[in-house]
Image (tube, helix red, strand yellow):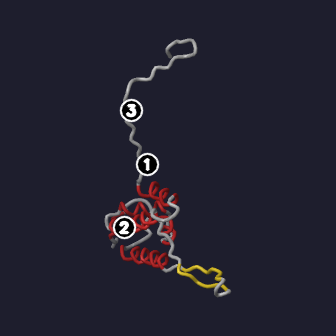
Amino acid sequence: MANKSDKANPVGRPLIFKSVEEIEELIEEYFDFCDNRTQKVYSAKADGIIECFNPAPYTMSGLARRLKIDRRTLLNYTNKEEFFPTIRDARERIHEDVEQRLMEKNATGPIFNLKNNFGWVDQVDSHITGTPLVVINKDDERI
């Protein structure tokens, strides 16, 4: 007897994740890893190496790597009805983290991320008013 995942993908490769619970557990492991990451640094005060709390930023690529799939495959799981809410929630959590990082010193990386992963765009509005410009060359001829 075929399971629900087999019915949802009648052609092509079988799904990597057989249940929503399986992918949810791995997603939470990724966020826990990011939230609890530490880094070893030299401390002059301690005259040695100490371990510091240094949370990692959330990224779509990082999540995909933790799931052992590529970023495009992760996004494709949103096309599967049963996985859509889980992937959407993880994506929105990452989106929120990236937006918060815009408030930090260097926003170039987060801006790039938001444009490429979340559809943000730079928008420029131009309004031209006034009289038309007439260009005259050196021989006093209109161009």
Circle 2 is placed at which residue position?
A: 6
Report the amino acid beneath label 1: Asp
Report the amino acid beneath label 3: Ile
Q: Position of residue 53 (x, y in %)?
A: 53, 81
Report the amino acid beneath label 2: Asp
Query: Marks 1 and 2, how far apart in space?
Result: 41 Å
Quadrant assignment, res 90? bottom left
Foreground of the two, 127 or 77: 127
Q: Are marks 2 and 3 in contact (CB under 8 Å)?
A: no
The quadrant of the image that shows the N terminus is bottom left
- Total marks shown come to 3
Circle 3 is placed at which residue position?
A: 128
The numbered mark at residue 136 is none
Q: Position of residue 108 (x, y in %)?
A: 52, 57
The numbered mark at residue 122 is 1
- Which of the marked residues, 2 or 3, is nearer the chain's N terminus? 2
